[in-house]
Amino acid sequence: MRHRGFTLLEVMVALAVFAMAAVAVVKSAGEQLAAVPILREKTFATFVAHNRMVDARLESAFPELGNGKKGRVELADQQWYWRQEVIKTGDEEFRAIRVKVSLDPGFDPIISEVTTYVAKPD
C-alpha cells in the first residue's frame, strides 16, 4: 500500500526552515525601519548644506580665506545650524568652500558636510 503526503518529520523540518527565514525577514525590516529617521535627518541636513552652498556660489566676490560664516535656518520644523569655511587650494585661482550642518549649535555631531570649489572672477 502506497501512502501520499508528507511525514511529520518533513513537515517539522519545513516549518523550522520557514521560521528561520521569517525571523531574518522581520529582523531586516526592523533594521530598515530604525534607519528611516536617520536617513530623514541626513537628507534634510544635506538640503540645508546645498542651499547654503548655492548662496555662497552666488556671491559675486571671491571668498576670503578663513571666512567663517555661521547661521541658522529652519527646515522641516527643525532649527539647523550651518558653518561655512573657505579653504586654500593648491591653485591661487580657486578656493574651496566647505559647509557643515548640525542640529546642535556646537556642531556636535556634524550631520552633513558639503564642499565646492569657486574660481576667481576675471
Image (cartoon, helix red, strand yellow):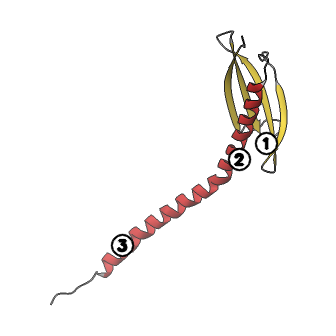
- Pointer 1 with pointer 2, Cβ within 8 A: yes
Disc 1 marks a residue whose amino acid type is: Leu
Q: Position of residue 51 (x, y in %)?
A: 74, 36
- 13 or 107: which is nearer to us? 107
Q: Name the residue rendered at 72%, 26% in the picture.
A: 98
Secondary structure category for the residue under label 2: helix
- 19 or 49: which is nearer to us? 49
Front tag of 3 and 1: 1
Residue labelled with disc 2: 41
- Indicate which disc, 3 or 1, sits on the residue closer to the N terminus: 3
Measure the alpha-carbon separation of dots 1 and 2: 9 Å
Q: Is residue 84 above or below residue 80?
A: above
Disc 3 marks a residue whose amino acid type is: Ala
Asked whether the viewer can see residue 77, the reply is yes
Residue labelled with disc 1: 103
Secondary structure category for the residue under label 3: helix
